Image (cartoon, helix red, strand yellow):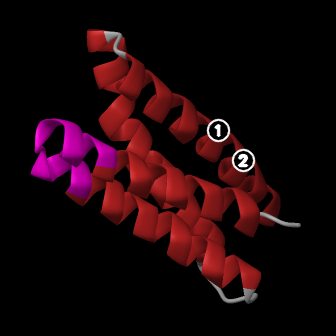
Amino acid sequence: MGLEFPAYVLSALTAVGGTIGYVKTKSVPSVAAGTAVGLLYGLGGYRLQNGQPLGLELALLASVVLGGASIPRAIRLRKPVPVMLSLFATYGLITFGDAFRHTL
């Protein structure tokens, strides 16, 4: 089991989280962002699984986008959803960032 598994898990978590955000608050940005970041993680996982180029970079990009959106909100609002998204992003940044560093 390689890096594709965490990419798929993060893909599902962000996509489901965005959908739940939409259902609870009718927030279109929540579902759009959750789906977009989930697709990036999913595509990264798929490319990693099949040994295609740019899989790791896509998963890392998804973590950067998620972190850039959620970490400032988590610090400012201290609410559970932004904090959880920040933790997911941090996990992705550490996991995929370390793997990317080893490719350099």
C-alpha span from label 2 to label 1: 6 Å
Residue 28 among magenta residues: yes
Q: Going by the image, does 92 lie left or right of 64?
A: right
Where disc 2 sits, the SS reads helix
Instruction: Let me know if residue 104 appears in the view.
Output: no
Q: Residue at x 53, y 71 (%)?
A: 42
Quadrant of the snapshot with the C terminus: bottom right
Q: Considering only vertical position in the picture, is 44 above or below 72? A: below
Position in image of residue 46 (x %, y %): 63, 81
Q: Residue at x 12, y 44 (%)?
A: 27
Q: Which residues are magenta?
A: 20-31
Q: Which residue is mark 1?
A: 91
Q: Residue at x 89, y 67 (%)?
A: 1
In terms of secondary structure, what is the magenta stretch mainly? helix
Seen from the viewer's position, the closer of residues 36 and 56 is: 36
Q: Which residue is mark 2?
A: 95
Position in image of residue 51 (x %, y %): 75, 87
Instruction: Let me know if residue 65 appears in the view.
Output: yes
> Are the two marked residues, 2 and 1, in contact with CB atoms closer than 8 angstroms?
yes
Q: Residue at x 52, y 77 (%)?
A: 43
Q: Amino acid at mark 2?
A: Thr
Q: Amino acid at mark 1?
A: Tyr
